[in-house]
């Protein structure tokens, strides 16, 4: 390995400390000035210009906390926690509520945090297919609230990226588009001409990212189980337009080597 590929760090002191990470070990919040609306059909269940963003300890992704007066609490009835915990909250909530509008009942649509300091605020879930839509100002948004301090850059590069599953090469490219996103390791999106397609097979899956869009193309290993190892955004959001149609691999599930160095890894839930 070239010495120029080895990370170097300055000496820490009272005068120089490393910038705090993107996640906090404690509960955290900050105000939002965005005009937020959440809809069930034509009903605005949430409308707020004074929400706060709330991060659970260790969480990269925030949730919105809304003042009670900004939520149609008259449509909420006590309910049970959802079966899935893929989205927030990760910690047990103090109270869960179902949303009832006419004959339509939506289970686990809202909750209150089990933290006295957040009394007076309520969260309404962004879990897919719970509410029918969200807007920030007049722009549709999805998946989860966007962090105003999160940055996503898609940069063309000539780095040498090799992807392997064991000894088998899945991709070899000198033309990646690298996505740098705050709090995550870089992701390497590769031209389809550099993929060894005989080593992959298409599977049915999808995911959403409020910064990048909707990934609808997924692949598993041709010789392995139906477990995603690669994905693509056919029509990404404009901020990452250069990744359109390119293919990225989970460095948590295969080996992604960049200029001879193995790429970093992260929780798969935050990977794409």
Image (cartoon, rainbow, N blue to C red):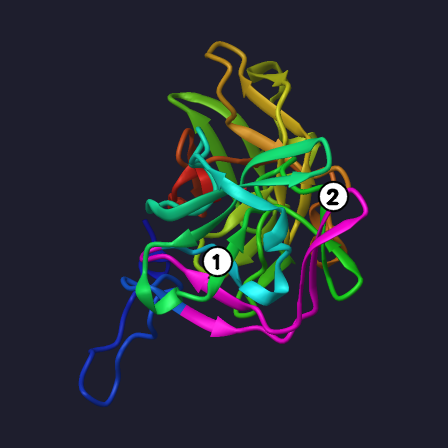
Which residue position is annotated with label 2?
244
Question: Residue 271: in sight, yes or no?
Answer: no
Does 209 sit left or right of 110 as displayed? right
Residue found at the far bottom of this picture: 15
User: Image point 66% across, 48% down: which residue?
Assistant: 142
The relative height of residue 64 versus residue 210 in the rendered view (above or below) is below
User: Image point 29% across, 75% down: which residue?
Assistant: 18
User: Image point 81% across, 47% down: which residue?
Assistant: 42
Front-lying residue, 47 or 262: 47
Picture coordinates of residue 128, whole percent (x, y): 62, 37
Does 126 sit left or right of 141 as displayed? left
Front-lying residue, 113 or 224: 113
Front-lying residue, 238 or 116: 116
Q: Secondary structure at mark 2?
A: loop
Which residue position is annotated with label 1?
62
Q: Residues within 10 Å of mark 1 (few under 14, many from 20)?
A: some
Q: CA distance from mark 1 to mark 2?
A: 27 Å
Image: magenta residue range: 29-58
Front-lying residue, 34 or 37: 37
The quadrant of the picture occupied by the C terminus is: top right
């Amino acid at each position: 390995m070239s010495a120029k590929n080895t990370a170097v760090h300055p000496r820490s002191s009272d005068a120089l400390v490393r910038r705090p990470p993107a996640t906090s070990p404690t509960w955290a919040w900050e105000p939002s000035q965005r005009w937020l609306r959440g809809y069930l059909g034509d009903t605005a269940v949430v409308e707020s210009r004074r929400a706060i963003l709330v991060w659970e300890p260790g969480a990269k992704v925030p949730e919105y906390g809304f003042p009670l007066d900004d939520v149609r609490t008259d449509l909420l009835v006590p309910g049970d926690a959802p079966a899935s915990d893929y989205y927030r909250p990760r910690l047990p909530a103090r109270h869960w509520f179902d949303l009832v509008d006419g004959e339509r009942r939506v289970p686990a649509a809202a909750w209150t945090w089990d933290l006295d300091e957040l009394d007076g605020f309520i969260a309404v879930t962004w879990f897919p297919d719970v509410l029918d839509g969200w807007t920030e100002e007049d722009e549709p948004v999805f998946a989860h609230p966007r962090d105003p301090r999160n940055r996503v850059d898609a940069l063309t590069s000539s780095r040498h990226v090799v992807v392997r599953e064991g000894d088998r090469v899945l991709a070899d490219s000198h033309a990646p588009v690298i996505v740098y996103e705050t709090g995550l390791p870089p992701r390497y999106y590769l031209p389809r001409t550099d993929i060894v397609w005989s080593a992959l097979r298409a599977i049915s899956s999808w995911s959403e990212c409020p910064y990048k869009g909707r990934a609808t193309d997924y692949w598993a290993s041709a010789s392995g189980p139906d477990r995603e190892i690669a994905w693509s955004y056919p029509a990404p959001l404009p901020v990452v337009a250069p990744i359109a149609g390119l293919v990225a691999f989970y460095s948590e599930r295969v080996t992604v080597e960049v200029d001879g160095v193995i790429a970093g890894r992260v929780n798969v839930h935050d990977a794409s």
